[in-house]
Amino acid sequence: MTIKELLDSGEKQLSGKGKESAKLDAMLLLCHLTGMDRTQLFMSHENEVTDSLAESYLAMIEKRAEGTPLQHIVGSANFMGLEFKVTPDVLIPRPETELLVEEALKILTPDSRVLELCTGSGCIALSIMKLYPGVTMVASDISPAAVHVAVGNAEALGVPMGEGPGKIDFRIGDLFEHVYDKFDLIIVNPPYIRTEDIKTLEPEVKDHDPLIALDGGPDGLFFYRRLLYEAKNYLNPEGKLLLEIGYDQAADITALAGHAYKNIKVIKDYSGNDRIMLMEQ
């Protein structure tokens, strides 16, 4: 069997299970298994594959066909051009979340102190540290397992850990628990899915992403209420709060912010949906 025949077999199996990204997934799984990039794989289409490679590949295809996310099969996800280890203990990074990093980079100065809550895999905080390495970063999550993943990603990316400029300090706690400092920027991608809506999500999300990273309470606003009430105590004067939100939550969060925050800005994602909110102390 050639590489092309193996790819075709994988794509056919995924298409038969209704996977819209069947062709891309089939290619990415074989790239992961062989260590080739897409160009190398294309140039090797007529090469014969070993039985053991074909067996391993088709086992991966079967997992993907059954609904296991591609990122869990290969063990990593690309975010801001960087590779992050992901496990079932952390939310798989989404492309729209890159907007949080892009907006943060517009705000930062070399002496900025930044807090990221609900850090998960650490993809947001660590991307900022790689792209703007001089800032002081604190990143926290309620899940010890998630923080363990984030620490591993920091080590893999060569981001120094500890306190002070150019370093990231990981903490375990519920939002501002174990946070004692004040910051110029607080970034959060909190759980914001309405509890009743979780059962309507794609199986790859509801069955594989951690529930704790999805469930925003009955109206999806549970964590925003807490954040908007508590963040004021942790922001420096003129400090900013940067949030990812659900596509239909901007008006409700603006109302929750009330007069406690000013210069509220709503930023749309690449699909034209409200996705990011920026506000000032």
Image: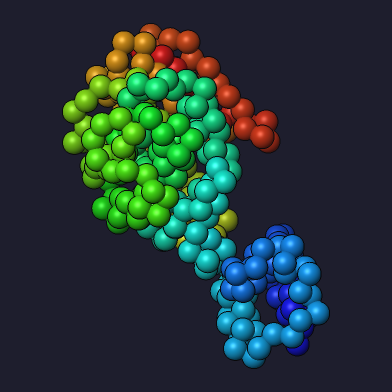
Q: Position of residue 53 (x, y in %)?
A: 61, 84
Query: Which residue lies at the image location 48% right of the left edge and 35% below the top edge?
Result: 131
Q: Position of residue 132 (x, y in %)?
A: 45, 31
Report whether 125 appears left or right of 236: right
Q: Position of residue 42 (x, y in %)?
A: 77, 68
Q: Position of residue 250 (x, y in %)?
A: 52, 24
Closer-to-camera residue (61/215): 61
In the image, residue 116 sits, relative to residue 196, either above or below, namely: above
Q: Quadrant of residue 109?
A: top left
In the image, residue 85 sits, relative to residue 127, either above or below, namely: below
Query: Is residue 278 in view from this perspective?
Result: yes
Query: Which residue lies at the image location 68% right of the left edge and 36% below the top edge?
Result: 271
Query: Is residue 15 in view from this perspective?
Result: no
Report whether 150 appears left or right of 27: left
Extreme-right residue of the structure: 46
Q: Quadrant of residue 43?
A: bottom right
In the image, residue 115 sits, relative to residue 194, either above or below, namely: above
Quadrant where the C terminus is found in the figure: top left
